[in-house]
Amino acid sequence: MRYERPETIVQATHLLAEADSNAFVLAGGTDLLVKMQSDGFEADLVVDIKSIAGMGDVVEADDTFVIGAGVPCAALGENDALVAAWPGVVEAANLIGSTQIQGRCTVVGNLCNASPAADSVPALVAAGAKAKIAGLGGTRMADVLDIPTGPGKTSLKKGEIVEAIVLDKPLARSGDAYLRFIPRTEMDIAVVGVGINLVLDEGGAVQSARIALGAVGPTVILAEDAAQALVGSKLEETALDVMAAACSAASHPIDDKRGTVEFRKQIAGVLARRAARIAFDRAGGN
Amino acid sequence: MNRPFGSLTFTVNGERRTAAAAPGRRLSEVLREDLKLFGTKVGCDAGDCGACTVLLDGAPVCACLTPAARASGAEITTVEGISGQGANALQRSFLRHGAAQCGICTPGMLMAASALLAETPHPTRAEVEDAIGGVLCRCTGYTKIVDAICDAATVDADEAIPEPGRAVGARIERLDGRPKVVGTEVFGADYLPQGAMDVRAIRSPHHAASFTIGDTVSWAAQAPGKVQVFTAADIPGINCFGTIPPFADQPAMAASRVRLRGEAIAIVVAETATLDEIDLSSFPVTWHPEPCFVSLDTEPDAPLHETRPDNLLITGFVQTGDVDAALANTAHVASGEFETSYVEHAYIEPEAGVAWPEGHTLCIQACTQAPVMDRDDTARILGLPEEKVRIIPAAAGGGFGAKLDLSLQPLIGLAALKTGRPCRMIYSRAESMMSTTKRHPAKMTARIGCDAGGKITGMVFDGDFNTGAYASWGPTVAVRVPVHASGPYKTPAYRAKARAKHTNGPTAGAFRGFGVPQAAILQETVYDDLAEKAGLDRLAFRRLNALQDGDRSVCGQELHGVGIAACLDALRTPWHRALDRAAEFNAAGGQARRGVGIASCWYGCGNTGLPNPSTIRIGITPDGTLNIHQGATDIGQGANTVVTQIAADALGLPIAQFELIGPDTHLTPDCGKTSASRQTYITGKAALLAAQALRRDILARSNMGEDARLRLHGRTLVITDGTASHDIHLADLPENPHGYVLSAEETYDPPTEGLDENGQGKPYAVYGYGAQIAEVEVDMVLGTVKVHNMTAAHDVGRVVNPMLAEGQIEGGIAQGLGMALMEEYIPGRTENLHDYLIPTAGDMPSIESILIEVPDPEGPMGLKGLGEHVLIPTAPAILNAIRHASGARITRLPALPHRVLAAIRATR
Ligand code: FES
Ligand code: FES
């Protein structure tokens, strides 16, 4: 196995593009080290991106936050401006693993590992986050929604690296929230995760909404009917009922030991109701 | 991945260190294997248990998920680094509070806590729970760990050493605690003799298969270093073991057919570096999978073991009175059925140990609960005389029953015999979970009747217990269950049957309670129905039926020292308070509902109607050293401490003067196995008898009366009685072959009688009793259950050490809560600690322990066992509370949210 620690993103993309097979990016390492232990797993090349300038930074510009691929999740919670702007995204990122994992795991790693139950992804999708992707031909932007294509699979092409996550500054009168359901109090994998972002109009009614569901399909699901159900409402029970039903309908979970299909569909609706209330409050609704 | 790659420099505990390290190596591996800092533990290698927590530039990280390359240039602090000269304030607080039981989680806890305390010297409980949320403990239930961390800033006064005669009952620190908190305790994986090689097993990926092993010689030849392969064909003795000799049926390595997933078929022995380079999945074996069944839902067409048609291992049976007539003519009858799942012991230490030849003796230092059984079975498998095998129990990082069975002992023993070198083996988490025993899944039905006044008239119980591929402790479970399924209640007519049946599931063996917790769940939930039918308060109903002194059990045994009524009486006030609290909460309405439940337990201590002696030797050397040879393995429960407390008071010398020897099959007489809640009672009684005998001898030599005081001053033993005084000059006395000038050795075996064909007899000499109240909150929309409080009253006869007793209660409740709400082992799917969930600090309720002392006429100083009792009432109390809160009648464990929600729906 070859281990490389390039100093620039261009070098990193070249290394990955030229690798014959089994090349992996090492960010925090919390997923990769576990994988490396499993039988039959082979890594021929590991590209450690820690030494690349800027990877460990959260940069606040006039209208965006740029979260580098090497930023540990714990650091998001320490960034007051980000917490104020996107509390739901930060909460989701801070739910990944224990304190000891938080110091190492990254949002980009969570995204590229492409687990259907990844906590940060529904929150990012609800927030309309984009991924900045470096490749041989330069950088491109893609919706976070489009990165995972199935369990363990992404739309990244050979030689491409997600360099950063880009979040727009939130609009006025908006708020986001993330809730997940786990059987244990902490340190568990989501049975259902719901990210919601609401923007209110001047009258305090929902002007636009984005609702993303995690762990109820092979990839994160953008529940557009559910979001539509909230538009124009002030989260009256009837609107919430329609929204919850639409969330359940949009969910296509599998039966497993953590929950049955029926249960997960139902919980998606229940959590969406509770998350919507939080987001609504944060947006200043009442 | 582990090919050396340059070197790596970092600071460890203030010292600059360099390690040759491949970049992908884990920091945990570099610390342990290269720097020999064994204080950092590895429980899962996957970020799930936190045992490997160290500080990296002051922040807590999982060393197992930190690539060594990332430590380059960093400052690492391990448990050794905070220990300095001795224990620091936090470590002393851990000792003072009894926060370390087995101690395997302790270094990780200490490091996580250190990071918190550096920023927040006076944390709240919530802050502490948050900080240690990623570190799992299977022993303590976290309560005392949180206490210790919150109290770390308190300056401790030097502990008062109890006077002679005052050791029993004193809240003293565990005698073996210090190494556990400073990181020097030697667990199975922590001893690496010079020149040791590593052993890895090749295991079956199938539940059932025949197999043929191919050309291992050519396979081994491809490795970058010397590799040796051994299979069943290399086993020199009888390739068959079992914890109960008449049922022995398990090979150390399968010869041609496997009966469960994870069964070993070969071992590969080489230098660690060589082994790391080999892909074990390329081992030359051809599998021929066979039809398999892992649960009792499907019946197989062929028996797993030829001698056991219908896959029936054994049936346990107890019958008294005419139960059919009783139930036909009684006022109220309630019936129920219940199904439980496989439960994994999930100790934080996966099996580990090392074997080495020493002259003509094979030494094995490994985790165990039963050193003498290990010795006898390993000797038989390896074709050695018993005295040529020496078992030195390593500190066990938790056991709970699974470390009673052999695991790696014959494998490392064979490797050491064949290679002539020390051989070490450390199970991976997956290997540990796959191949070792579990709690029996049970499918049970019961019918119980009471008269119009609420008095129990009869009970019928029937249960099938999935005993998995091999016998292990299946016979014990099948026999214990019918003896105990009545609960601690007077049941005049009774018929109970329990069958242990084989499947290709994991072998089900011993797990805290031997099947009694499963049976108690059914009996105690049906009792709630009966109480309702009889129109009685649920606690009052139980109190009405509680066994009394002189009553006969369902086995016809006349019972004495019965403490269940006292336990229930102690719970009366907490019960009514809890009911009021719940009613008040529920009056506010909302989606959360609170409920209260109660359940009891009783449990016989020691083997069921079979001999199980313990022997203790106490001796004084010519130079005045007072030794106690204590052969009971202390797996965290505290045998080292409580047995010595008893000996100290019986002898009349201060506990601080005792030196502990053992356990070690070459140094300590047999104290049997650490199971069946027997050590405090049986080994404790042997210690009492040995100490009394020694005292008698000393008093006789000095012609002093019974009340004389002993003092040991250097080489002189001073005996005083009033004004009379006598000195024994130890150096003047002749030494016996053990090197003692004064000594005594005594054996105690409980007076029991075997059971007849109706299960009548005297199965145990001593029983312990208890009852617990659970207060829960159920989210009626999500189906989640949060246990807020547990109040536990346990009759221990006589409290030897209240701190250790509370520790047992809190730890038992944690395991009972896990069993009730989250734990379900599914072969092939939950072989790690993120798919198999055990409670974390945040899952724990606040616990109030009430220790009751109803002396037992047979137990030493009146005491009774406690270790398993504590887990039995927890799950049924929680289920009864869920029902009280929500109406949901759970009939299958664990009560996962989707099952709770479905049960809530079923009530509508
Ligand atoms: S060994 Fe590192 S978390 Fe378990
Ligand atoms: S003391 Fe925590 S695992 Fe044993």
Image (cartoon, coloured by chain):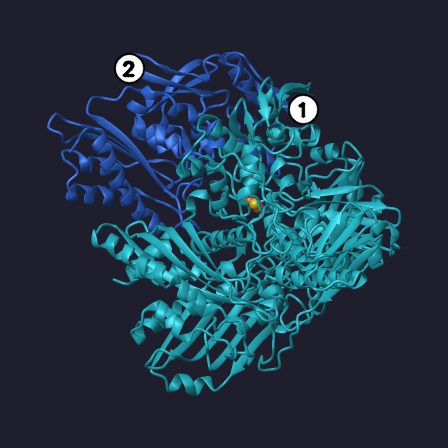
Amino acid type, label 2: Asp
Picture coordinates of residue B271, whole percent (x, y): 77, 35
Hue of chain A? Answer: blue
Amino acid type, label 1: Ala
Chain with colour cyan in the figure: B
Q: Is residue A123 above or below residue B888?
A: above
| Residue that carries the numbered disc 1 in the rendered image | B21
Q: Which image quadrant: the C terminus of chain B?
A: bottom left
Residue A263 shows in the view: yes
**At 65% across and 77% down in the image, what residue appears?**
B753
Given residues B46 and B282, the one toward you in this image is B46
Q: Which image quadrant: the N terminus of chain B?
A: top right
CA–CA distance in space, label 2 to label 1 = 44 Å
Picture coordinates of residue B758, whole percent (x, y): 57, 82
Displayed-image quarter of ligand 2: top right
| Residue that carries the numbered disc 2 in the rendered image | A63
Given residues B221 and B815, the one toward you in this image is B815
Count of marks placed on residues: 2
Picture coordinates of residue B752, whole percent (x, y): 64, 74
